[in-house]
Image: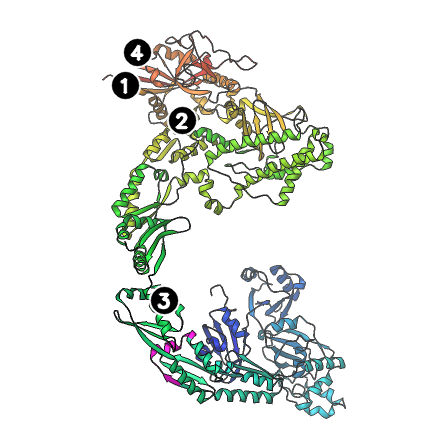
Amino acid sequence: MSGESMEERSVEVLDLPDGVDEELLYLYFENKRRSGGGPLESVEKKENHAILVFEETEAAARVLAKSHHVLLNTELSVKKPHSKDRRRLLLRGTNPNTSTEMIELYVENMMDLNMTDYTLIPSPERDVIVIQLSQPLSKDFQKLRTKITKRTLDGAKVTLEQIEQTDSVLVENVHPGTTPDLLTLYFESERGGSQRVKEVTALSEGTVKVSFAHYESVDTVLDLPHKLNDTKLVVKPYFDFLQPAQSSTSEILNDETKDVIESSEDLSSIQMETSPLLDNADPDQSFPAGASNSGQSSSQTELELLGDSEAEEVMEDQTEKEEMFSCHVAITDPVKRALFQSSTFLQDQQKANPNSSIQNKNDGVYIEGSNKHQLDQLKDNITDFTGSMVQTNFTLELEKALFLDRKDVKERLLRTINQAESSCLYSVSDSTVSVTSLSQNAANQACSFLKSQVCCFSMPVEMEQECILYLREWSEFLQSLGFTSVKVSEPGANIDVWTLKGMEDEKQAAIMMFLTTPIERETVISMEPGMLKYIQTHCHQLLADMHQVSIFPLENESACGLKIHGHAVACQMAEEVLQGVVTSVCTRTIKTNAPGVARFLDEKECRSILNEMETKFQVYICPIYVPWEPLPQQDIFETAWHMMSQKNFQKVSVVGSAQDMKSDSVQTDCNGTSNRGLLQWAKKAPTPDQLDDLDDVDLYTANEPKSLTDQVSDWKSVKSSQSSADQNATNGTGLWTDEMGLSSDLEEEAQLSLAIQYSMESSNCLLKDDEEQLKEALELSKQLIQDERTSSITDKSPLLEQQKKKKKGISLEDSIKAANIVELSVFAGYSCDLIRVDIAFGKKVSQRQVEEKLEHRNIRQMSEYHHKCLDMIKRKHAVEIQIQGTIVAISGFKDYVTSAMCDMKLLVEKISNSVSNKEILKTVHWVRHDPSSSDTVPYSDDASVFIENAWRLKLKKVDILLDNQPHIISFDKMQEYNMASGKSVKISRKLNELGDVTQDVPEEEYSLLANLPEVSKVSEDSDEFQDVVKNFYGTIQEYHSKIRIIQVEKLMNRLLYNQYKLKKASIIQQSTHPTIERTLYHGTSEASVKEICVHGFNRSFCGKNATVYGQGVYFAVNSALSVQDQYSPPNTDGYKFIFVSKVLTGDFTKGCHSMKTAPLKETGDIPLRYDSVTDDITSPAMFVIFNDTQAFPEYLITCQRIHR
């Protein structure tokens, strides 16, 4: 009902007789059989009409559909109540002096209307104006009202209001001598709109109010032009507020009518017989439609006043509408009404009166005909017939009376009675049976017959059979038995059976057979899987005690529960007991949020905790689906790299075109490759005219173009490579794909056109026949469509992804979140146990949560790739990682945090040793060669950095998205391959001019190196001091408790720093190793400290302690090596000196004693040397450099051995 408007549920009742109050209206219109209505929400009675509001729209519709409603012997008229008029609005508060043109402009601007869309109807005082719309209002009225309220009109504050529908029109310019009957005939004719007129009221001279029976009639009449007596009528909607404050009391058409009649000799004889409208009319007098005060000559006078053609039309309409009479004879007693309908009286009367219509309608008989006398006679006949019906009552025992009231019994007995040509019906109320017949004799015979047909007998019931009487099989048996009622006496007694005469033996034998035949039953008690496990675990003794039946657990997708099989009595008892158990079991979903809790759920320790709680609290715990799974690819750095490879890069750096390229391309999710650009590219295929201009241009490379077959082959190769890359990316992101449906026909045609375009671009295709070209084009098209299917997986709705989560996997972000949330469904016998489990599990989880922190100054320098690595650490170890400044906080379960901390330290080391993007761009840039010229076009900065990093990783090729199109960069062939178009272009690695590499050194670094050769002591309270000390002790190993740091000093030699930066730029250009710079340790004697601070590391006084791997300067990876007395001998005070240095290790190989410089590299045409040598290539412990500017002393640690 909430969705149904009050307007749809309302009905207006007119012409209510005196004495009808609201209570009587309630009783009548809530009686569905009489009125067709239903439950009422409210009744509001005003004078002789009322507004009814039903609870349901259907009830109101039934009342309106019913043509006749009779109450207190008076026919009521019902219709829809007037509602808000959608075609007329009221503008209130206008200034009477405001011009019409200004009002029109205001309405057009505020309501966005044209001049032809509306008409203004002002009141006589011009303070209110009706806006009549040509079409119903489609805009939001409230918004329109607010808009108009905020805007004044000629200084006046106006408001917009909705008005109720009117059922009347105002007719002006009425010709003198026009009567109410003439107006009624006109508006009920086809020319006037064929609308039923209810009333005509004279208002003033030449002005009449015409009211219609239905509100919808007004719009129909207003949409037509009107002309009567050769005079054009002005018809407007009638509203009280548009009328003058005081109506004129002058007579309507008085003088004009007299002049017309006196000047016409033909009409002199009927001057005194004209309507009151023509002579001395009362302006406020109303004339009901069809009424006349002028006698028999009234209509004749009206027709004479019309023209010839008009009179003919009115006469035709009048002839077509021959007056019909109707009446309704109510038969309130339902039994008498049913008997009347079953008799032949109605058919007999219809045959005798063929010109009348006699129908059974609702609660009586509806009669309609043109002969009023005949209708009255029919009404009397029907009343006499129903009045002659006889009703006789007799009393029986309650059980017998109820037996007679059974539907099957009643039908059989009435059929027997009516076969004797004695129409009768009976009804039962409690113990009283009422027989209604057409005569007293027939009624008495029917009473005697009914009494004689009921017989009763008793049957003994054995003790073991008593339980059967309470089974549902017993109730089903009695329903199928028919003509039988059974009552069970007290336990140990008999059962009483009532049936029809002559059926006793049959029914007794059937009942006895049922009671003595064993009944097997099989039933299933459905329940949740967790509920089943709870009952199996904690109610197993109860199940074991039910040995009279067989109980089987059902655990499959179609059904879950307990299946019970056995004797019906035992089954019913077991079913009732188990249903009680199921009802008593409490259930609750426990949600726990903690880092790594989903991973912990799979641990043996967690299972032990859950088993312990199940035993302790007598519950069953069922984990809800946990989407977290171990990371398949354990190398976080490699996985993060593959994720970065799926990022979209702008291909070239073109000033001013970056935004255009971005807008033209399809946006791609960074977590997955999208090849939607292929279809867009197809739509941008060159026109034939453009192709003609490109005949001499090689669209692929400067080399010989490939044939279509080669392109298809390369495409398959590329797709295979891409699938491999996608699989690796999937391991990192958790994204999966499945087979998709075919593309639409339009897209498939576009793809096919693209494939044909590719095949036409190859010069070799001209040598092949058409059939072969078509086959190859179709093959390429299939590849493109399959690719489109694969990429469209990202467009699936979130709901579908949720439903298929188990099969398809989830994204990286969701997988990280999933590790921190777990839901448990708990089933228990008592609700308090559910609360205990919630608290206990939460406590067990929180007790195992720890947090470890790592501080390093380089954490602030994390790149996008490093952040991806951080996400992979979260994903791999199921931990939570928070970064604040230079501090990383890892929280979660202890074992997970410990393993995550190891990967975090590797990441910090990677950050410290990585070359920044800015440094790469200053030294090297990747370019692509324009196939149409010898010019080179540089890649965008982001793309160039990505390609350089891939080159440093020594990859043979790498997948990359350039301008949202998949490409392959091949370092073996040094070419870029566009997978969408099949084109290839050459690429090359271009070294930049080094220039002044020191120009970008920050001012704070210059200030630190300003005073040579001084050093500054690092405050022990600073983060810088803590970083140096933590890294020092982090690699000191067995000397951790044997060395004490005295102080840390920072060097300030600007000259050495600039030389180091210049060397670093040179190594970046030549080196292929991803890590070219490391933080290493160098222990030395007190005598060499000052020399190193001033001149740097010089081979003339360095390398004295070791030359095993070459005659250069040695640096240790771990501080444990440098603190040994062999490398940092203590002075007289016991102080030892260790330099913390930045060292450019670059490309390195294993060293040997005889090396005085780094050896030459074996590959490459240009003779280049390694940048350093080491003791072990796979796991270096020390590095040796042979160039003094490759190391920069950054800190000097003064320490002392602790003697115990």
Q: Which mark is residue 1131?
A: 4
Q: Amino acid at mark 3?
A: Ser
Contact? badges 4 and 2 (CB < 8 Å): no
Mark 1, residue position: 1042
In the image, residue 1194 sits, relative to residue 276, either above or below, namely above
Residue 299's quadrant in the figure? bottom right
Q: Nearer the viewer, mark 1 or mark 3?
A: 3
Residue 1025's quadrant in the figure? top left
> What x and y, as percent, mark residue 985?
62, 26
Mark 3, residue position: 475
Q: Secondary structure at mark 3?
A: helix
What is the span of residues highlighted in magenta in the rendered image? 393-408
Please state which of residues 682 and 1014 is positioned toward the viewer in this rendering: 682
Q: Residue at x 46, y 45 (%)?
A: 802
> What x and y, as percent, mark residue 883?
40, 34
Mark 2, residue position: 906
Q: Can residue 976 be seen?
A: yes
Q: Amino acid at mark 1?
A: Lys
